[in-house]
Image (cartoon, rainbow, N blue to C red):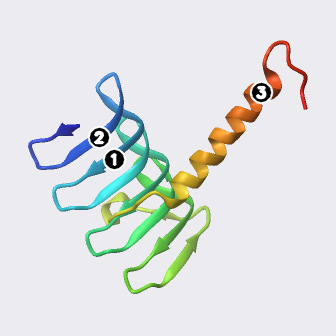
Amino acid sequence: MCAYPNGSRYAGEWFINQHEGYGVYVAADGERYCGQWRASRKDGVGRYYYSNGDIYDGEWSKNNAHGMGIYIHVNGNTYKVHPPFLISSTHTTQTHVLLLTLLLTLAHMHSLTHTLTHSPGRMAV
């Protein structure tokens, strides 16, 4: 885990001193992001938990919610987000891992299937 002087924390994968791969970032104000990172920016699939209780669960690009996702308001209202919708990172709040877990599980299953069907000496099914 890495603790920053401003009170924020990051736990996850690193590459050349940058957040890279899967990680969890908790801001000093309690907002947090759980998901994929590229070059220390939210990029891939993840969940953001906002300080007001709202949640965005979906795709991210260069630190912005971008692409398919679900925005869940603290009052229970849910909105499906479809491209080319973009939520600026200045409006971000908090997210968790339901969609991320599902997508990572599916990606892992695809990877295993690919390995089993494309391994040397094995027949494709």
Q: Identify the residue at horizontal 71%, vertical 39% (top origin).
A: 110
Q: Amino acid at mark 1?
A: Val
Horizontal side of residue 27 vs 106, given as left or right = left
Residue at image mark 3 = 116
Residue 64, horizontal then vertical, whole percent:
43, 54
Image spot of residue 7 (x, y percent): 12, 49
Q: CA distance from mark 1 to mark 3?
A: 31 Å
Asked if disc 2 and disc 1 are in contact, CB closer than 8 Å, the reply is yes
Compared to residue 1, the image places residue 54 above or below, namely below
Mark found first going from the N terminus, 1 or 3: 1
CB under 8 Å between discs 1 and 3: no
**Could you say where residue 97 lies in the image, as x and y percent from the top left?**
46, 57
- Upstream in sequence: badge 2 or badge 1: 2
The crowd level at tag 2 (other Cα within 10 Å; few <14, some 14-19, many 20+) is: some
Q: Quadrant of the N terminus?
A: top left
Most distant residue in the top direction:
121
| Numbered mark located on residue 24 in the image | 1
Specify the amino acid type for callout 3.
Leu
Could you say where residue 26 lies in the image, as x and y percent from the top left? Answer: 25, 52
- Badge 1 element: strand
